[in-house]
Image (cartoon, rainbow, N blue to C red):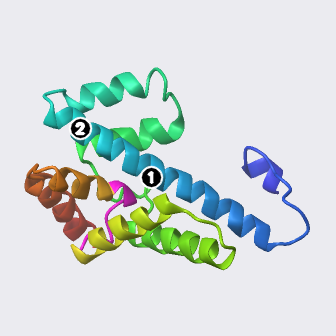
Amino acid sequence: LLESTSTGVFEFGSDPGAANIAKLCGNFLIACAIESMSESLALAEDNGVDRVALMTMLNTTIFDCLIYRGYGQRVSERDHFPYPDAHFALDLGTKDVRLVQSTAQKSNTPMPFGSALVDRYTSAMAKGRGQLDWSAIGMSVSEDSGVDVSKHLERCMKGLDKKG
């Protein structure tokens, strides 16, 4: 069944917990990508470079892959609405980055980016953004650089009202 519904089945040893570690590692890499795209696009925007045009160039050249195309579009356009077919909620992303940090601490694995991500996601949760897509941390990065994202946030939140 797994082989017919996935792109592959991978073995990580006999410990079933290894699959959870693999999932956390993948989600950690995605969260890092979202944060780094957000910071890069804030730098571009603050220096007069169109954030959408830059992301389009990046995700069609050196970062031409699913994660950068999908989340790159969301972050560059500030489109963090929780679409039913393409959505991982910020509150779930927060849970995962906290699990990454907890697991890292238990195994004495330093993960300084993990600490920064926990703070970023916790801040977004405190702003009431838990039901938006986890790429909504990009709004916090923009806000930190002095950009008013209120109209984008309002659009995303109105969509939540209609959805619920």
Estimate how packed mark 2 is, as few (under 14), some (14 to 19) or many (20 or more) residues with alpha carbons within 10 Å: some
The residue depicted at 31 percent of the width and 58 percent of the height is 137
Q: Nearer the viewer, mark 1 or mark 2?
A: 2
Residue placed under numbered mark 1 in the picture: 86
Query: Can residue 145 be seen in the rendering of this structure?
Result: yes
Residue type indicated by callout 2: Leu
Using a 10 Å C-alpha cutoff, classify the residue at mark 1 as few (fewer than 14 neighbours), some (14 to 19) or many (20 or more). few
**Image quadrant in which you'd find residue 17:** bottom right
Q: Earlier in the sequence, mark 1 or mark 2?
A: 2
**CB contact under 8 Å: marks 1 and 2:** no
What kind of secondary structure does the magenta stretch mostly adopt? loop
Tell me which segment is drawn in magenta.
128-135
Q: Amino acid at mark 1?
A: Ala
According to the picture, the residue beneath numbered tag 2 turns out to be 43
Q: Nearer the viewer, residue 43 or 125?
A: 43
In the image, is 4 to the left or to the right of 75? Answer: right
* Viewer-closest of 161 and 94: 94
